[in-house]
Image (tube, coloured by chain):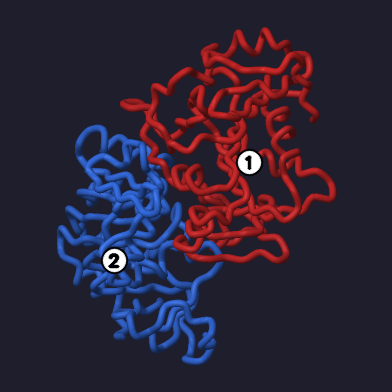
């Protein structure tokens, strides 16, 4: 199983029926492909849609139905649409059960940086700051390292997305949570050792004597 | 409400005007008005919108033509042209969290001075802003936004100018329609009065100044 699939499948196990969930672009989008059988969730696109479906077949798209990246999308039965003020009222107002986002860095207390690299990449924060500040549960989907360097760091060197800590970080190596404001190794991926995770992580990691294996 | 040609509508817009433009990555953007702004070469525009789309689409066409002096937006990541012009200093870009941007516009159209939001507290977004504590929680005071013109795109407009939107092409449109001094609307379809049921009118004709005639 490749890294992205491991991450997406593990995060999909956090879904519960009836949740309203926003998926960011990149690995987070893949979570929608692994929703467990019998679980029905509402996916929100922040451009104004609840009930976001799959990408339409060729010839079945409409210019007024797109995802947050501007690409064609479908709407599932029971879908609804609304303006951007309503969309962010849902996000900021505590109505969103869960958001899944990518990360550039996450620090030892769970604070996320994911929207800019000064002088290099300035795409703008889009909805990320509102999502991290307002969602009931924030899950980060990211590769454990970038070009061999840990992304789970002591202190973010990049600008923060929010001071609100994330709830869970899921990588292809581990699941990390932040109980009591401290990075804690909760699960390891199949075939990965605790020592390997610690080696690939800059932030100090708390852990139990025996760390369970991720169920996928 | 008056009906107007796209040429005459754009002729009303002076160089340097502030424009709120509907659309999200080009979906729900009044493309005909954009094309005419480019054709008439309106300069030094201040564009307030969610994003600058892609170089060949929507607001991206204004950026590509060098007509935008400043933009206030939440995301420019899919338009390398905007990023290049920003870094080169050819265009000022004020990046605002999306939920804050739409609420600042909503406040501008609703007679409010601004809004208090937790978004951005403790980040670079709070620089230069007043922080206000309410019941022990910190918020940023984000001020209201208004513009000279709101350029709106609807799916249905009736002969009086009542507007209804389609699916995700709604986005910023009904909100900016409240915050522009002059509201110019285009619509995919212009239909008889009554086709849009009263319950389904989203933007009332009373606030639409001009409806651009379809070809």
Residue annotated with mark 2: B108
Q: Is residue A138 above or below residue A7?
A: below
Q: Is residue B190 above or below residue A90?
A: below
Q: Chain of mark 1?
A: A
C-alpha gap between disc 1 and disc 2: 34 Å
Q: Given the current orientation, which residue lies at the most extreme left position?
A: B15
Q: Viewed as shown, does residue A174 lie left or right of A124? A: right
Residue A29 numbered mark, or none: 1
In the rendering, what colour is chain B? blue
Q: Quadrant of the N terminus of chain B?
A: bottom left
The picture's colour for chain A is: red
- Disc 2, SS: helix
Residue A206, quarter of the rendered image = top right
Q: Quadrant of the C terminus of chain B?
A: bottom left
Query: Which chain does the residue under circle 2 lie in?
Result: B
> Extreme right residue here?
A38
Residues flagged by tags 1 and 2 on a common chain = no
Q: Position of residue B201 (x, y in %)?
A: 48, 81
Q: Is residue A114 above or below residue A72?
A: above
Left/right placement of residue B183 relative to residue A188 reads left
Residue, x 15% and y 58% (percent of image)? B16
Q: Percent x, y for residue A185?
A: 66, 21
């Amino acid at each position: 199983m490749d890294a992205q699939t491991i991450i997406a499948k593990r995060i999909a196990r956090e879904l519960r029926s009836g949740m309203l969930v926003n998926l960011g672009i990149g690995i987070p989008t893949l979570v929608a492909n692994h929703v467990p059988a019998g679980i029905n969730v509402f996916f929100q696109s922040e451009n104004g849609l609840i009930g976001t479906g799959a990408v339409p077949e060729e010839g079945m798209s409409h210019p007024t139905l797109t995802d947050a990246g501007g690409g064609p999308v479908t709407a599932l039965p029971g879908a609804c649409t609304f303006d951007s003020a309503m969309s962010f009222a849902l996000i900021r107002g505590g109505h969103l059960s869960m958001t899944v986002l990518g990360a550039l860095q996450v620090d030892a207390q769970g604070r996320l940086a994911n929207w800019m690299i000064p002088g290099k990449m300035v795409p703008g924060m889009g909805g990320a700051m509102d999502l991290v500040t307002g969602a009931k549960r924030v899950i980060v989907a990211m590769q454990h390292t970038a070009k061999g360097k840990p992304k789970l760091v002591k202190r973010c060197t990049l600008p923060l997305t929010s001071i609100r800590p994330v709830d869970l970080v899921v990588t292809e190596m581990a699941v990390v949570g932040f109980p009591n404001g401290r990075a804690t190794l909760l699960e390891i991926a199949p075939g990965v050792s605790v020592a390997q995770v610690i080696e690939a992580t800059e932030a100090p990691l708390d852990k139990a004597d025996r760390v369970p294996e991720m169920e996928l | 409400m008056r009906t107007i040609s796209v040429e005459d509508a754009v002729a009303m817009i002076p160089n340097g005007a502030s424009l709120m433009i509907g659309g999200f990555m080009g979906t729900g953007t009044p493309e005909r008005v954009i094309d005419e702004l480019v054709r008439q070469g309106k300069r030094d525009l201040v564009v307030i919108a969610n994003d600058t789309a892609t170089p060949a689409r929507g607001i991206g066409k204004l950026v590509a033509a060098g007509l935008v002096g400043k933009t206030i937006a939440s995301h420019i990541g899919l338009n390398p042209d905007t990023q290049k012009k920003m870094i080169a200093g050819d265009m000022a870009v004020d990046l605002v969290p999306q939920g804050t941007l739409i609420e600042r516009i909503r406040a501008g159209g609703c007679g409010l001075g601004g809004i208090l939001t937790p978004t951005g507290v403790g980040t670079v977004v709070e620089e230069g802003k007043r922080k206000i504590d309410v019941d022990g929680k910190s918020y940023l005071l984000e001020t209201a936004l208004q513009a000279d013109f709101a350029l709106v795109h609807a799916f249905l407009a009736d002969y009086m100018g009542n507007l209804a939107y389609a699916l995700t092409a709604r986005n910023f449109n009904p909100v900016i329609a409240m915050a522009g001094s002059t509201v110019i609307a285009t619509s995919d379809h212009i239909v008889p009065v009554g086709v849009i049921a009263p319950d389904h009118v989203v933007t009332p004709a009373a606030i639409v100044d001009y409806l651009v005639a379809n070809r």
